[in-house]
Image (cartoon, helix red, strand yellow):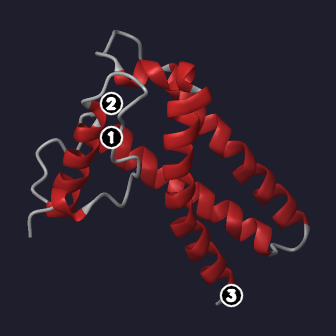
Amino acid sequence: MISFLVFLATYLIMECVTWCTHKFVMHGFLWYLHEDHHQPKYAHIFERNDAFFVIFAIPSILLFYYGSEADFDYRFFIGLGIFAYGMSYFLVHDVMIHQRFKLLKNTKNKYLVGLRKGHKVHHKHLGKQNGECFGMLFVPFKYFKF
């Protein structure tokens, strides 16, 4: 039970980590890696922004490794929470919102439509200043129609 709670807490905390990283790192000193994500699309499959998947994967991999070496202690479940959030981020951000893979294009789910609207507002700014809606799974309620 404690392992599940560690996993769940990590998963939820990752939204805060993502918000802070997006606002202060991606739109800050690592704008170089994130900038192409805010520009009109070009013919490449990958963006420099995809480097952030690797950056977030490194702690997850290390926690998996060291947690499994210690009989699957709390570090393993923290790594699992980071991994699960990363998978959620990929499915929501890259698949559903940006349609890098043509799935969930015509969803009517109010939550997913709200996420898409919030992210669209974020992308109306092509530069690193004046950004809004830095979260991924939790966006302001004004984007949801209930």
24 up-or-down from 5: above or below? above
Q: Which residue is mark 1?
A: 95
Q: Quadrant of the C terminus?
A: bottom left
Q: Secondary structure at mark 2?
A: loop
Marks 3,2: beta carbons within 8 A: no
x 74%, y 49%: residue: 59
Q: Which residue is mark 2?
A: 100
Please report whichever mark, 3 or 2, sits nearer to the chain's N-terminal start: 3
- 10 Å crowding of disc 2: few (<14), some (14-19), many (20+): some
In the rendered structure, which amino acid carries the disc numbered 3? Ile
* Residue 140 visible in the picture: yes
Q: Residue furthest front?
A: 130
Q: Which residue is mark 3?
A: 2
In the rendered structure, which amino acid carries the disc numbered 2? Arg
- 10 Å crowding of disc 1: few (<14), some (14-19), many (20+): some
List x then y, in percent, for residue 11: 55, 66
In the rendered structure, which amino acid carries the disc numbered 1? Val
Q: Secondary structure at mark 1?
A: helix
For residue 78, side relative to residue 20 (left or right) = right
* Residue 46 visible in the picture: no
Please report whichever mark, 2 or 1, sits nearer to the chain's N-terminal start: 1
